[in-house]
Image: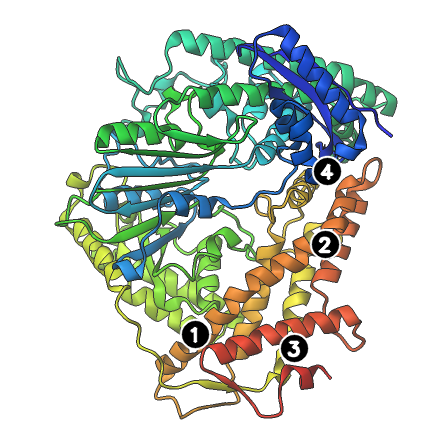
Amino acid sequence: MAIYTSSKSQTQGRPGWSINFRHPLRRDARNKPGLKVRRGLGTTDASEAEHLVAQMNQLLADERWWSVTRRAEAVAQFDGRVVDAFYDEVEPATSDSRSIRQSLLPLPGKDDGYSRVLLVGTTGAGKTSLVRHLIGTDPDEDRFPSTSTAKTTIADTEVVIAPGPYKAAVTFFSEADTRIGIEECIFNACAATLNDDTDERIIERLLNHPDQRLRLSYILGSWKKAAVSATIAADDDWDFGGDDPAEKLPSIGDADAVPQSEAIVHQSRLQDYLDRIKELTETVADPVLEDLDIDFKIAGPDDQDAALELVESELSQSPLFSDLANDMIDDILARVDAVHAGKFDRKRSGWPTQWAFETDDRSEFIRQVRWFSSNYAPSFGRLLTPLVDGVRVSGPFAPTFVVGFPRLVLIDGQGLGHTPDSSASVTTQITRRFAEADVIVLVDNAEQPVQASPLAVLSAVGTSGHYGKLAVVFTHFDQIKGDNLPGPVEKRQHVMASVRNGVGSLRETIGGGVANSLMRAVEHDAFMLGGLQGHSNKLPGAVKNELRLLIERCLKAVEPVKVPEVAPRYSLLGLDFAIQAATQKFHDQWSTRLGLAARSSVPKAHWASVKALNRRIVSGLDSYSSLQPVADVIRELQTQVSRFLDSPAGWTREPVNDDEIQDALANVRQAVFSTLHDLARERLIDDEQPQWNLAFDLRGSGSTFKRAIEIKSIFDDAAPVPGPAMTPNTLQFLETVRGLVANAIKASGGSLEPGHTTKEVAS
């Protein structure tokens, strides 16, 4: 059995003593007990710190204390700071971020006369620029919400247009989730060092996570390059003559810009990180390569991947590795300490869980909220944006082109990736919000409309029965050019022709009825916008009018929905074939992603991405970047069940037309869709946690292939494909899905054929 002890230390740049120890109940980067923890003790007295270390050693030496149930008893025997350092983070979280924001700043809904508008679209399509115009914020003075052509929004940004003071509620990713990203960044920087990359490249790998969510440069500062590369021309040579407000330099006295003296300190700290990365690589990684007799710089890709798998395991066990991760977390907490406005709630470790702020001063409000939402380069070194998973604000925001305050709640989340993968899924973070939204606004680029990601949204909206909520905004309408497109009428026709082609390509998958409903929704509620990167008062009159029509569309969504006067009747006998088709397609796609099969339409995932997914699932999440098994199962089941629902056995009366049919079926589709999220999460993640742990624990030669086999086995168990010879697990899965569909049919006013209950079908 491992022997655990603690020690005291002082952290650079932070006063007072900290306690360091490996925690017997918390897992490290290898998913093994013994995470190295550092906690501030709140004292500058060395003897007092030594006394607290002695108490911690007593607690660590006796396994009887290693249970959260002993915390109350431990309080009576040990100093509270020692108890907190040991038991914090061991206890499971009791609330999620959305419930925290709801408790701080409740979202109004239909009962309050408000329409909730969910904006969805690809990165760079212009979702956030649209939000700026709808709430009347200035792109130069306010810079809220933040925009760029790259992935900007990683958090839910919720804006409530309401009279009264300005209020904000901000929630944060957990320390554990952030630590995962930091450790992956350290490993990536070590890999760049092994490859003999430049200092700039090594630091870039350290400060920017591959999935572009954790951008540590925002928090810790940018690396100042020693010189401009000979292959890159000076900035002036890249001046295209445009006036991009986002690229303007800060003015003298810019309150958001990091002072030069502070930037020098940041640079010094980054240099220290760089030196330690090189030391870590030299002392830990290089010996591994020597043992393998591999020259990393000239090795082939397969040999490099195999070597990195072994190097990663060794790095994560090194005290140098954990010390660097802890130092980076301490530096992050120092940036949190620098925010003096508003009120933080923190864990005892100092990690923030929420921040609230209220004021009548609009300028001060936006200035303070920007610390949690901005991507303004002159502020790098102070921004907390990468730590934030949700920003909710309320106040008298309003568009400049309408009178009064439209009662809208605008929900803007992370953009969809630009992917050629036709099997791409919409994240569960987005699809879970379909039900609570009154309007789903798909924001797409009119220059290249309806590519893979927008089509995935249309498919998800259609098969889930939410097509009645759909509106589509096409941005960059001003950039459509061509000799055959002389005016706005021709340009609009050009865009809509692309939409018809795109929806037509979905017809075979989602069914003709759903495709027709989607097309009707788009033709009725399509809005052409351009020039959104500029000021609202400079928009052409036609664009302002389109925005007014969009607002009217959103406000009308609070009106009562007509209840269909006809309801479907089903026999469940054909449902098993739908479930079989869905699970088979899911397995085909994931066999390819895992490198166990080959399908041209699905890319193979890199081993590091698969391992990153595995690590996040072990930590309680359900996806990593474009790898989204839960969303994939939901998509396939919903698509196939939707096709099943297209053919009821009968109706309460003969429907008048296709519109009446689709309105009635929409209620059933929505009811099914709302249940699939919990089913998929439970079967693929929660019920399979021990197996996910085993997959992640695999190390050594061949572990990449073994992990792929283990994950495939998890999916086989969680979402089995029905066939002639079915196991009890497969029968149980079938019965569960049948029950969900049957309940959804009845809950939405439909009925089942007599003699076809789920129990009878199962037998």
Q: Badge 2: few (under 14), some or many (20 or more) residues near its Cα, within 10 Å? A: some
Viewer-proximal residue among 105 and 600: 105
Of circles 1 and 4, which is in front?
A: 4
- N-terminal of the pair, mark 2 or mark 4, is 4
Residue 215: image x %, image y %? 50, 29
> Who comes first in sequence, dot 1 or dot 4?
4
Q: Which mark is residue 577?
A: 3
Per the model, the C-alpha gap separating discs 2 and 4 is: 24 Å
Q: Secondary structure at mark 3?
A: helix
Callout 1, which amino acid?
A: Asn
Tell me the number on the disc at residue 667: 1
- Amino acid at pointer 2: Glu
Q: Residue at x 26, y 68 (%)?
A: 559
Give how far apart the Cα atoms at labels 1 and 2 are: 32 Å
Q: Nearer the viewer, mark 2 or mark 4?
A: 4
Secondary structure state at the residue bearing disc 2: loop
Which residue is tagged 4? 67
Residue on which the image places disc 2: 688
Q: Is residue 757 left or right of residue 346?
A: right
Placement of 499 over or under 345, stated as above or below = below
Q: Residues within 10 Å of mark 4 (few under 14, many from 20)?
A: few
